[in-house]
Amino acid sequence: MTSRKIIFLFVLLLSTLHSFSQEKFTLSGTISDANSNETLIGVTILIPELKTGVTTNEYGFYSITVPKRNYKIQITSLGFQTIEETINLDKNTKKNFKLTGAENALKEVVINSNDSKTENQKPEMSINKLSVATIKKMPVVLGEVDIIKSILLLPGVTNAGEAASGFNVRGGGADQNLILMDEASVFNSSHVFGFFSIFNPDAIKDLKLYKGGIPARYGGRASSVLDIYQKDGNSNKFHMSGGIGLITSRLLAEGPIVKDKGSFLIAGRASYAHLFLKLSEEQKDNAAYFYDLNAKLSYKLNASNNLYMSGYFGRDVFDLNKSFTNIYGNTTFNTRWNHLFSDKLFSNLSLIYSDYYYGLDLDFVGFEWRSGIKNFNIKYDFRSYVSDKLKLNYGLNGIYHEFNPGTIKPSSPDSGINFDQLEKKYAFEPAIYINAEQKISEKIDINCGLRYSLFYNVGTSTVNLYENNNPVLFNSQFQIYEKATPIGAKHYNKNEVIKSFDYLEPRLSVNYQLNENQSFQASYNRMVQYLQLISNTSSPTPLDVWTPSGTYIKPQIADQVAIGYFRKFKEGAYSAEVSSFYKEVQNRLDYIDGANLIANEAIEQVILNGQLRSYGLEFMFKKNEGNLTGWISYTLSKSEQQTPGRTAGETGINNGQWYNTVYDKVNNLAVTGSYYLSPKWTFGANFIYQTGQPTTYPNGQYEYLGITIPIYGARNENRLPSFNHLDIAATLTPKHNGNKSWRGEWVFSIYNVYNRKNAASVGFRENVDTGANEAVKTSIFGLVPAVSYNFKF
């Protein structure tokens, strides 16, 4: 079927759905926190009489169209008191609501919905939410609250090892996750090579992880989307909050620019462990620290227009005796304009800048290295509330990418290094999408979408030419792959198209509600990823380089199907969900044996196109009410990659057989809980167990000219020992003096209570005394106690 026919049928479907809707009266407005005027995301506005409802969007706006009459409406959100109000809807009505915080709101734990009563009524397949309040109750390493570490407790999500960057979703690579902060792409989500995430929890308003059933407005990655929004700031009154820990401290200030109209927020965080190094004479010239800054301005021009400006800046610094200096980090900036064309049409226009920078200075060698990636993105999104049964989302965006694979320059006049600029690369990625949320009947909801994405790899650039257009040759005599020698090169001028791609990306989710306590869900989505991360490590590192799809590198194309079942027990006090998924990814990069990726100007000579598949079963059981709350999640899954030979006689990688990816974790168990003992004491605990990470060990050796050379078996046929640890925490909240605005709490935590020495890697060496080979395990953490003090006023 041609692309035009698919688009025609999709538009016809939307037109048919629209024909069932009727023009009625509309109730619309915004919902915010009564204390701060902060708009609230995902608040449920329910009309029980009609068994219908709506939730607020990313900017707190809602709109629902229903027949003329009196209605009792319910407005509910996690951590806030429920509002019940009767409204006579005899005309289009705008009404804003302010929610008041509920007592003991912080002790509640709810992931998938803000309201358990409507949790299984939405066609949101494989989507998880975590409240910041829940995250702050989780014990973590060194006492530092961490958003990335918290999502590892969700089913289908694993880490790449202890203190490793990124996360893996449903057997995909960390580079296949789209991470957004206020709509801006984040290319490295970690500080200190994975010890901490870059997200300051004090500045975060909302986060949502899409593992499947991904809406059509998202694109550009093959595995998942982590969508994070920063707080807007308090437009009622000035507040400050922060925390002091063993490794880091943080401070946030927010307040009104113009009361009830404009606000500001600024938050800073920094580590200071390197200061302790100064106490040692041997370490006084060494430093290792990070810092970041979040800022946001919000202003309400009038009832129909709002402006937002937000940004993030973060850096990691490692300095060893002033001879080795490593600096890397992210910079993002976003300007947004919200506009209401009517009470049924909401729009958002965004101008976004993202920059990931990596710098390395080696004074003892005499050179400096700089690399990175920059994005310039303009996007315009619309949300049309056609009726209480039909909502449309549509929009377009265009991203301009600039890739700097490496700049080398001498660090001093007497350096023996010559200046060299690895050729920069450029690309343009436009897209258009439409998405419909349709309530077919009382039992069936669908969410269908279509995204049309394009990608242009453009100059200025020079592309190597090879015989038979083949940059990788197979040596049949030695049964190995080798680099081909270019037979020429072709130069492309500025903005001249080198290679272009375009794909349709259909999305579909269906929710069938068996009754008020049970529902079945199914989804399918196709995602296309045009940016490739050149890395053969198990997790991203700052030295990894992003590159665009082009003449020799094809886009990754991911197709995923999932089915699930959800059930509530005892009026929502307990809930359980089980889901199964199958995912295939075309054109997943693989590397020939011995591939050199660093500063490689002809990367196409060491890569092959393979395919990835992953499948699994996910389970989660939650306790949502009572003094003890929490959940148990378990995932049984498999993740494999295959790179067969391209022609007869080629072996491919691993003899063309499927082999385990480095993110294959067959068993993944996570348990987390929080116990509210009294207003003074709250306790928390986490337990994680994962099957060991696949790796390749030598299975033999031989000697050549007196040198012992190891022989390796099939790729990733071995595994590290299983990964597991137990963490506990206790929060002490002193009795609040009603006459003072200062509030504080002490958090005591122990990471890895039973001192498990999890293997970050296993190496092999010859014992100098016995001459026998021996395995050596490298571990990062043992038992780590921590204490921190949090405050606000």
Image (cartoon, rainbow, N blue to C red):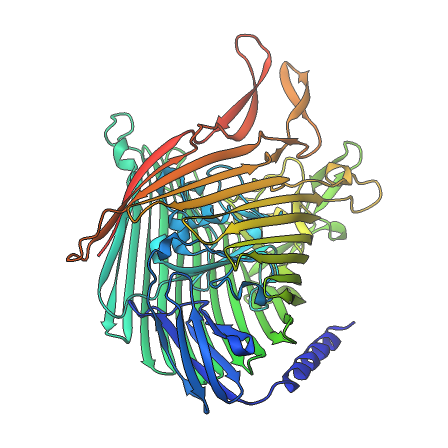
Report the residue at 58% width, 56% height from top. 211
259 or 395, nearer to the observer: 259
Is residue 198 visible from the viewing direction of this image?
A: no
Seen from this angle, which residue lies furthest front?
A: 570
Q: Position of residue 616 (x, y in %)?
A: 67, 47
Q: Position of residue 15 (x, y in %)?
A: 66, 83
Q: Position of residue 191 (x, y in %)?
A: 40, 45
Q: Quadrant of residue 138?
A: top left
Report the residue at 66% width, 34% height from top. 716
Give left or right: position of 645 versus 105: right
**In this rendering, is residue 21 above or below 455?**
below
Seen from this angle, which residue lies furthest top?
A: 770
Q: Position of residue 175 (x, y in %)?
A: 55, 50
**In this rendering, is residue 397 above or below 198?**
below
**In this rendering, is residue 425 above or below 30?**
above
Report the residue at 56% width, 68% height from top. 217
Count all numbered tags in the image, as a single digit: 0
Is residue 55 visible from the viewing direction of this image?
A: yes
Image quarter (top left, top right, bottom left or bottom right) of the N terminus: bottom right
Q: Quadrant of residue 41?
A: bottom left
Seen from this angle, which residue lies furthest bottom?
A: 91
